[in-house]
Amino acid sequence: MQNRKQIVVTVLVVLCGLFVLWAKSRRGDWGKELAEAERLRDAGRYIEAAARAEKALDIAEKRFRDDSLPVARCRLALGEIRHCLGQYDEARALLESALATFEQRPKQRRQMLGVAAGDLGRLYADMGRHDEAQTLLERAVTIAEESAPPDPATLTTALADVGNLYRIQERYDKAESTLERAIETGKVSLGRNNPRTAAAMNNLALVYSDRGDCSKAEALLKDAIAIYEAAWGPDHPEIATSLENLAVAYIGSEPLCRGRRGPDARAANPVEHLRTRPPHAPGADGPPR
């Protein structure tokens, strides 16, 4: 009788172990593809990243419910990559779906809800839907501020994003104060040489450029480019964006934009970028998605 009980216990232990391995393998397939997609995205290799994110999403959709968190995470990542590639309609559908899923579980995935709100808000801004963008971006800031434990990486990015939207709305005083807060938050919590801090510098430089203060814009852009290059190397797409902004600042140091403010400065500034924050850098400045 005792031997029979031991056999039963041994079988149950083995079955439990097999179940754990099976569960890990189910998550591991989509999780592994998603991690690789995010790595490629962070490196600026967006086409390759999109292919891996699509594979992750395909696996997740076949194994989980449509409104599950794994599916939402894959849609969020793929939506951001589509945004980077300028595929706005595809990005919108993916990000709206992801946000809707996280809305259903705000306590379980509070941080992801803030990230999704920020990603969709940035996309809406690029699409010219500024009122909707402002609602989402300000919500992303609130969620990051209320995060427990504190989430300075997401807060820095959220402040940089909404500050840049204020700039596009020509609310320059509010944009400047918001971006200064983003830079300070980044420096204190993440370090001066963190790409998220550099993104806030880049956005504040655009405010200075729009206002005609091109010497300040130039100094900030040079700092941002140096940080980006140290973090990612010289060929990352974000560096190209900042170099274009720096070229505008150089042009602006001549009479073209000196002393101009508001719409006049913006008319003299041929380069307008909203998506100026860096891609997420898991392990470097915040938790992975």
Image (tube, rainbow, N blue to C red):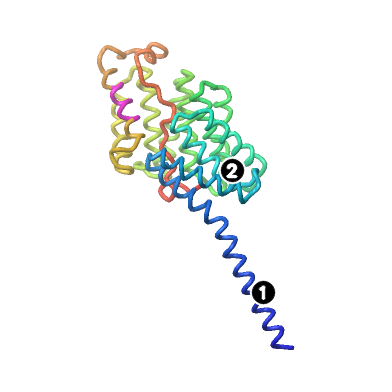
- What secondary structure is the magenta-colored segment mainly? helix
Q: For residue 102: magenta? A: no
Q: Which residue is mark 2?
A: 72
Residue at image coords 64%, 37%: 100
Percent position of residue 271, x then y: 36, 21
Q: Which mark is residue 12?
A: 1
Q: Quadrant of the N terminus?
A: bottom right
Dot 1, how many residues are within 10 Å of its Cα: few (below 14), some (14-19), or many (20+)?
A: few
C-alpha separation, residue under disc 2 versus residue under disc 1: 34 Å
Q: Which residues are magenta?
A: 241-249
Residue at image coords 43%, 32%: 85
Look at label 2 and name its amino acid. Answer: Ala
Left or right: 268, with 169 as reference point: left
Left or right: 197, with 258 as reference point: right
Q: Nearer the viewer, residue 196 or 280?
A: 280
Look at label 1 and name its amino acid. Answer: Leu
Q: Nearer the viewer, residue 289 or 220?
A: 289
Residue 146's place in the image compared with 276, above or below, is below
Q: Tell me which numbered mark, 2 or 1, is placed earlier along the sequence.
A: 1
Percent position of residue 180, x then y: 42, 31
